[in-house]
Image (spheres, helix red, strand yellow):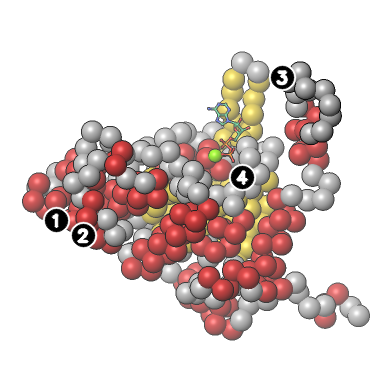
Amino acid sequence: MSRMNATPPLYLQQRPEVAERFQRLYQREVVLETRGLGKVYRGPNGETEALRDIDVRVHRREFVCVIGPSGCGKSTLIRILAGLEKASSGQVLLDGAPVAGPGRDRGMVFQGYSLFPWLTVKRNVMFGPLMAGSSRTMAESRAREWLELVGLTKFADAFPHQLSGGMRQRVAIARALANEPRILLMDEPFGALDAQTRAKMQKHLLDIWRNVDITVLFITHDLDEAVYLADRILVLKAHPGEVQEVIEVPVPRPRLAEQCAGAEFMATKARLEQLIHPPNAQAQDEEDDDAAPMLRLTDVTDNIE
Ligand SMILES: Nc1ncnc2c1ncn2[C@@H]1O[C@H](COP(=O)(O)OP(=O)(O)OP(=O)(O)O)[C@@H](O)[C@H]1O
Ligand SMILES: [Mg+2]
C-alpha cells in the first residue's frame, strides 16, 4: 500500500463538524501573535536559550494550550506575552500592535494565589477597574457580576484566607476578567489543586469561556487537561524551547466528561505522550544522570524497602 493511501492516525482525523469549526475559527481575527520570538538568558554560568523562533497566532475566542517538558520555556513565553519579561528577538503583537510592557489588555492567572490578602473578595475584583478610573459604584457592580459568573456571590465579603484553593483561583479569574482583557494568560493555574477540585475548575473555566468574549492561552504540563480544554495544543520541546508540533484537538465541543475516555481523546493524549516522553528520551536520561546519589538517612539495614 502506498503511503499516500495510508489512513492518518486517529488524532488527525476530524469529524466534519470539527473540521468545519476549525475553518470558522481561523477566519476570526488574530488576537495574539508572536513572530520569531526568542529568549536567551545570560547569567554567570553562561547562556540559556529558553525560546527559539516561536511563531503563534491565537484567534479570537480560541482556547490554546501550551504543553512541554519542564524547563522548555513555557513560563518564559507567558511572561514575555504578559510584558513582564523582554524577548531577546522577535515580536509580540496584540490586535496587530506591538506589545512593549504589561497592560490591562492581558489578564494573568498564575498557579500561586495572587490575591491581595488584606482585601475582601469583592475588593480584590474591584481593584483593577478602580485603578483604571472606574467609579466605586461602577467597579462594585461589575465586581458583583464577575463574582456571580464564577459562582462566588456568597463570598463577596470574605477574605482570601477564608476560601479554599479552588475558590481563590475562581476569584483570581474574576479579578483578571474584571479588567476586560483581550486575552487571559494562565500559567498552570490549577497546578496546586487536588485532582477533584482541578477537574471541577477545568469544567468551570470552559463554562466561563463559553459565556464570555475571551481568548485563552493556558499553560499546563497535564496532558489530560490540555486535551480537555484546548482547541489547539502547542507542543514545545526543550533546549532550546521550540514549537515541536501544533495539534488541533479532534474532540468535539461542548466537551463532556465521557469524551475523556473516547477514542479521539485517547489518541490525542497518546500523541502528546509520544512527543513529550519519547521512548528514548535523551533529555530525561541526562537529567537522571545528573542527579546526585541520594543521602541515606536511616540506620535500618534489614533491606525490606
Ligand atoms: N530568570 C532566569 N534566568 C536565567 N535562566 C532562566 C530564568 N528563567 C528561566 N530560566 C531558564 O530558562 C529555561 C526555561 O524556563 P521556564 O521557567 O520558562 O520553563 P517552564 O517550561 O515554565 O518549566 P516548568 O514546567 O518547570 O514550569 C530553563 O532552562 C530555566 O532554567
Ligand atoms: Mg513554568
Where residue 182 sits in the image (x, y, percent)?
Answer: 35, 55
Query: Tag 4: residue type?
Result: Asp
Crowd rating for badge 1 (residues with CA inside 10 Å; few <14, some 14–19, many 20+)? some
Labels 4 and 3: the sequence-earlier one: 4
- Cα gap from disc 1 to disc 3, whole angstroms: 58 Å
Where residue 246 sits in the image (x, y, percent)?
Answer: 63, 59
Query: Tag 1: residue type?
Result: Ser
Q: Secondary structure at mark 1?
A: helix
- Cα gap from disc 1 to disc 4, whole angstroms: 43 Å
Q: Secondary structure at mark 3?
A: loop
The residue singled out by tag 3 in the image is 297
Displayed quadrant of residue 303 = top right
Query: Tag 2: residue type?
Result: Glu
- Cα gap from disc 2 to disc 3, whole angstroms: 55 Å
Query: Tag 3: residue type?
Result: Leu
Task: Choose between 253 and 43: the one closer to the eye.
Answer: 253
244 sits to left or right of 98: right
Where residue 238 sits in the image (x, y, percent)?
Answer: 68, 41
> Residue at 40% across / 50% down in the picture?
166
Whether label 3 lies within 8 Å of ligand 1 gets the answer no
The residue singled out by tag 4 in the image is 53
> Residue at 29% across / 42% down in the picture?
162
Task: Choose between 111 and 186: the one closer to the eye.
Answer: 111
In this rendering, the label closer to the viewer, 2 or 3: 3
